[in-house]
Amino acid sequence: MTCRVWINRAALSWRIAVALLVAIAAATVPAAQSDIGSSSDFVAHTNGHVGEPGKFKVGHTMIEIVHTSSTGQRRPLDVMVWYPADAEAWQTAAPSIYRPRLWGVTLIPGTWDPLGFQIESKLARDNVPIASGEKAFPLVIHSHGNLLDPFVAADIIEVIASHGYVVAAPYHTRNTADDGRTDVVNRTAGRQVLGCLDGRPTPCSEANAGKDIADRVLDLQAIADNIGSYLGDGVDSSRVALFGHSRGSATALAAAGGSATFGIAPLGDRLKGIVGWSGAQPSILFNLDLANVTIPAVVITSSGDQAVPAAVMQQAYSMLSSADKALFEMNNAVHLSVTSGFCPAVQSAGAIVLANPRAFLDQRTLLNRLTESVNGPAYDFCNYSDFTTPIDIRSLVQSIGGFAVTPTNVPRSLSADDVVRVANELTVSFFNVVLKGCGHFSDGGYLNPEFMLKKERNAVLAAEATYVPSDQHKTTACDPSEKN
């Protein structure tokens, strides 16, 4: 039986298409009823504060896993790991500082000084012990976008970890920001100044997108197979969920459904669900076996995404065979809005460049982040304070990006703060369902389109979901400490 609900509000037409797929043995069996948007269901089945930090302190560390690429080559993989931390040890530890792996590496002395920007964590502390006395924490793996750093999504990752998850975020070898930086340094210098981080020949950035996706899926497999060697019985890698942005979203879809074109096999039964923010270009996205995706999935897109328009993601979503799936369309967020770490990165790099004209890679960071016409420049989603505090870098923004920042004209689209909050609400709620068995799609709460549109009426433009009613699922009560 299918039920569709349409909502029109003011000048906007907000759509909810809720399909209730009811498995019935005979026509005489009554159809299940959905109490969508019910505040009582919201309290009973989802965590009321999922958009905010949870009950756990957060630890952070870096590990290296070495495995084999899709073409049989040695593939060293650096992995950032966030996890619920021992509260007492956390109190005396210093905040984590996120830096590119090329941070402080010598370039050309006297001509180009080392890369220097860095970001201070909001929640995490480095190398503190994992919380004990708890069940093993489920594993979430984050896959970053094309030529990006994993820590630009730290605002989301830290909150996920604080709700009782181990979150592993690999630097996908040969498709990271540092690989791109190395190639820029060597190309601009006209000679090899830096070697590739994986020890292989330059150029360091993988040009074949299909091979990159295949290697990325193998990265996820290697993490799931090996993270127990580092965290012991503190992590449960038998139940895994993925969260990806841009090419990382395509990676999550490939891990769930595979790709005959790219020679990718799905991860298998331990993969319990995926969240994909935006996606890749159609030439990549529609060469994935989307119809083979049958596990629960949440797809997030935006009306303001010029890099991967909402229509593309809506088409990809319609091709998924998942019985439980949901699509949320943000209201005028740009492609990079979810990478909120770029905001403090621009502030840090700008302060360095103002003081040091030889800060070549920090200058490149500003150039990339302030001239992204398709993916969205930083002033599309960062706040006024990101350009003025602690250092006023507005003159650089105008000289590099051609945009005069004022207190009233930034952000130009949906703010990173709004985007991160919604992303936290959706990801934590989703992981609670697929990894902890806490509630279900068809219960009230953020995964329910009607509730989300009421709760986030300014940030979420449209939503739809297809799900099997919760009375057909065995669920457990959520942690009382995480409810309203």
Image (cartoon, grey):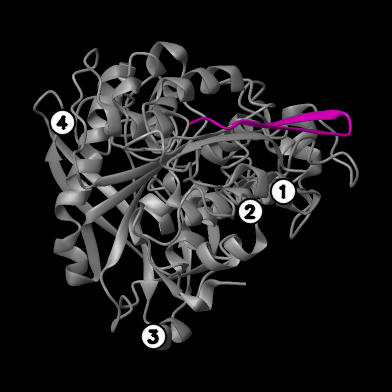
| Magenta residues (range) | 1-17
Q: Is residue 8 magenta?
A: yes
Task: Measure the alpha-carbon separation of dots 2 and 3.
Answer: 28 Å
Tag nearer the camera, 3 or 1: 1
Q: What kind of residue is marked 2?
A: Arg
Q: Secondary structure at mark 4?
A: loop
| Viewer-side residue, 299 vs 441 | 441
Task: Measure the alpha-carbon separation of dots 1 and 4.
Answer: 42 Å
Please determine whether, in this image, residue 408 is positioned above or below residue 93.
above
The residue that label 2 is drawn on is: 421
Q: Name the residue at 37% across, 81% down.
A: 86
Q: Is residue 348 visible?
A: no
Task: Measure the alpha-carbon separation of dots 3 and 1.
Answer: 36 Å
> Pointers 4 and 3 in contact (CB under 8 A)?
no
Q: What kind of residue is marked 1?
A: Glu
| Viewer-side residue, 479 vs 171 | 479
Instruction: Report the disc number at residue 89.
Output: 3
Q: Secondary structure at mark 2?
A: helix
The residue that label 1 is drawn on is: 456
Give the image location of residue 280, x and y in percent.
Answer: 45, 22
Task: Measure the alpha-carbon separation of dots 4 and 3.
Answer: 38 Å
> Pointers 1 and 2 in contact (CB under 8 A)?
yes
Q: Is residue 133 left or right of residue 308?
A: left
Of callouts 4 and 3, the N-terminal one: 4
Of callouts 1 and 4, the N-terminal one: 4
Task: Measure the alpha-carbon separation of dots 1 and 2.
Answer: 10 Å
Q: Secondary structure at mark 1?
A: loop
Tell me the quarter of the picture where residue 425 sits.
bottom right
